[in-house]
Image: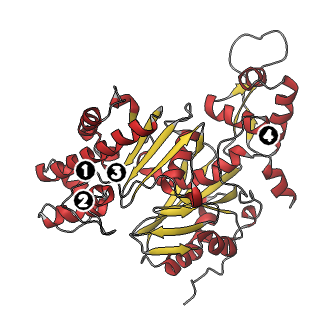
Amino acid sequence: MPPATSTAPLPPPLLRALPAPLEPPGRADGTGPSAVLRTVLREGPLARTALSRTTGLSPAAVSRHTADLIGLGLLHELAPPAGPPRAGRPQIPVGIDPAHHVVCGVHIALTHTTFAVVDLLGRVTAFQRIPHSGDAPGVLGQILHHLPAFLARRAAGRSVLGIGVVTGGWVDSAQGVVVEHDPLGWRDIPVRETLAAGTRLPVHVDGHARALAQAELLFGAASRRTEMVQLFVANVVDAAIATGGSVLRGRRSGAGDVAHLPLGDPELRCGCGRRGCLQDAVSDRAVAGRAFEAGIIPAPRFPLLLQRAGDGDPAALRILRERLRTTGRACALLLDVINPEVLVLTDTTAIHLPELLPDLYEEIAAHSHLCTDPERAVVPTPFGSQVLGVAAGAVVLDAVYRRPMDLRTARSA
């Protein structure tokens, strides 16, 4: 049966948006409008003279680029700073303008899909979670059915620049295809083609570890760094590597597959047929399953385990500490192999029970040859419970900040 689609049209503000990228996403080249926009994002509101000093662009180029970006609704002028009048031209700062544009983030998890509206500052302004059955036609059909009404209600008249779709497993971002997602049982699912045809919006598709890395480089723990590793631990385990401010993709976007590193219990057989795989040791599903078998929780659901641990249950705390220790060994390996400026950990335990992080840091210190200060080298994501909405939005926002003038092309189309 083909996916069900909504008959409700998308509202007019959604019809002009960024075209989907022809090349794999990466960091801006540091010139022109992108340099101005990214500098204002990183540093906060700046006067044009300060922008010229910071970017190295001439005053004339900065004036031209800021005028273009203001015209596109990406920057706006702010009130001059308080204080006595100064000689010369007033120093009027420009800042990111969140009033005109948003992006839509869609995260496909094992049991549900999350929609998010994300503004140009990476803030989630609205979200909705919908349970799903797991089969690809049903999940994509459900997105097509619910998304138009969600955006009509929550975009609040702002133009939607595109849809970012993220999920776990192996995602070919250049083709917009989920190549392999073992927990969902998906193989070669054409997500971009299906959703773009049904929404009339550009659709950017990526794995959530790379999307999280883009979010951290734009708005988070790596916004002032260029070398980082992102480690994602949930129902799937993925990593992403950024060097020179660009996220490494590898052939068919296959880089960052750490799920089957032999860092787990050698007595446990993974679904891949081997023993001791990292994902089988630390994933939400696997850990919740073991907690259920041990009688710690009444059903194999990870939120129940978190709740028990939060209530101080010793057995629940013990199993989550074990998970963090295994994750710490994975962090130590990645730190030694890549030696990044920072490793950002996205893990529900770290987000909700940060008091357990000393177990992670102790394991890193015990196993890493290079890391002398684990608490500075490895940090939890700053996005908290909204992390996946931010990540999904960042897939589109990365393109906005790299090629802002494409909006002008889209508007004239």
Closer to the eye: label 1 or 3: 1
Mark drawn on residue 323: 1
Q: Are marks 3 and 4 in contact (CB under 8 Å)?
A: no
Say left or right for 303 vs 24. left
Q: Amino acid at mark 2?
A: Val
Residue type (three-letter) at the residue carrying disc 4: Ile
Instruction: Determine the secondary structure under disc 4.
Output: helix
Whether pointer 4 and pointer 1 mark residues with C-beta atoms closer than 8 Å, the reply is no
- Residue at position x 64%, y 65% in the image: 175
| Residue, disc 3 | 348
Are the residues flagged by discs 2 and 1 in contact, CB closer than 8 Å?
yes
Tell me which amino acid carries mark 3: Thr
Where does the image place residue 92, in percent across and percent down from the top left? 76, 24
Task: Pick whichever of labels 1 and 3 is earlier in the sequence.
Answer: 1
Marking on residue 70: 4
The N terminus - image quarter: bottom right
Front residue (pair 409, 178)? 178
